[in-house]
Amino acid sequence: MEEVLQVFKEMVLASRDMPVKHLSCQYLQNIEYGAEDITILKDGLAFMSTGLHYPGLPSFSDGPGKMYIVDLLHPKPTPVELEIKGELDLSSFNPHGISVYTDEADDSVYLFVVNHPQHKSQVEIFHFVPDNTLVHLKTITHPLLHNVNDVVAVGVESFYATLDHSFQNDALHFLTLLLGLPWCEVVYYSPQEVRVAASGILSANGINISPDKRYIYVADIPEHEIEVYERKEGEQLMHVKSVAVGSLCDNIEVDHRTGDLWLGCHPNGMKLSPYNPEDPPGSEVIRIKNIHSEQPVVSLEYADDGHMLMASTVAAPYEGKLLIGTVFHKALYCDLK
């Protein structure tokens, strides 16, 4: 039993000391219940999923989740709640990972949102209308799309999705982690076909795509690694390499100019659950430069012991600015210059 406990402690980095490295940051208004995922368009519009209820993790709100938008070109960026129209039950809306897709044919913007009503998994596709409205187009469910954590859109109705549990049952999933059984997958979805695109992952979390659309990046959270895949014919993913990050990294954002990866991470998973406000979970932002080179540069960009920001999950850069989101706490707007 002691050996099992030791394996678990190493996996969640339980004995790790929390570094502190701050930036010039301020809290974003209106975000009190987390911003689990954030993604930014090239024109500076940032989408945020807020109010996630996730089994085993705290939540400071009993209400349903919401989507927000922030204009980073505004002198004082302030999140505004997006109005959601269409056939979607907003009373059970529980948004998790998100991705945005711009159709080059007409510049239409589509937002893909992982949703967990009653702790099920489905993917919602919305059309973004510039008057701060999301028009719900479609709900996607499929037997392969269970325990979905995050998505990256690759078409108007197609995406890759990560599965963070190999079993629906939490106890069985926990057992696979302790035994080191890499049974989680990345699933490719399109209206024409749905299938496993990559497997052999201990627990797949954040996912994103390179600016040239050639590579897919996946965070394997308990392995403390980012997996790099190359997209092949038929949307299969070929594993290229693993990059060690030394932290429990959650979502991945990619700088569209430089191709750098920005990761929101949990420095010590032992503090996430059970939650203790006297000894809160910390936050960490890690950046990877030149990930396709023989020696990628992994650097710590922001770190806090939880007294300013708890349980960071995402770090989204834009033109010298950085948004940092969390599972259940606040969100930061930071200056990188």
Image (tube, rainbow, N blue to C red):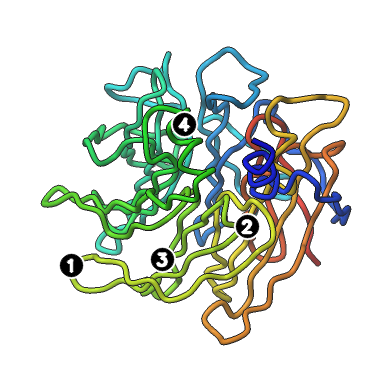
Amino acid of disc 3: Ile
**Label 2, label 3: how many angstroms apart (C-alpha)?**
14 Å
Circle nearer the N terminus (2, 3): 3
Q: Give the labeled residue for mark 4.
A: 95
Residue located at (31% from left, 32% from top): 136
- Give the structural element (helix, strand or loop) at label 3: strand
Label 2 to label 4: alpha-carbon separation:
19 Å
* Residue 96 locus on image (x, y percent): 48, 36
Comparing 17 with 306, the one in front is: 17
- For this rendering, which residue is in front, 61 or 80? 61
Q: Are marks 1 and 2 in contact (CB under 8 Å)?
A: no
State the residue position of label 1.
234
Which three-letter amino acid code belongs to the residue tagged 2?
Leu
Q: Split into 4 quadrants, where in the image is the C terminus? A: bottom right
Label 1 element class: helix
Q: Residues within 10 Å of mark 4 (few under 14, many from 20)?
A: many
Examine the rendered structure and indicate whether residue 254 appears above or below residue 64: below
Please tell me in which quadrant of the rendered image residue 173 appears: top left
Which residue carries the number 3 mark? 216
Callout 1, which amino acid?
Gly
- Cα separation, mark 1 vs mark 3, equals 14 Å
- Image coords of residue 124 (percent x, y): 33, 35
Q: Is residue 95 above or below residue 209?
A: above
Residue 263 tag number: 2
**Could you tell which of marks 1 and 3 lies nearer the N-terminus?**
3
Quadrant in the picture for residue 239? bottom left
Q: Do callouts 1 and 3 mark residues in contact (Cβ within 8 Å)?
A: no
Please state if 297 lies on the left or on the right of 128 as rendered.
right
Q: Which comes sooner in the sequence, label 4 or label 3?
A: 4
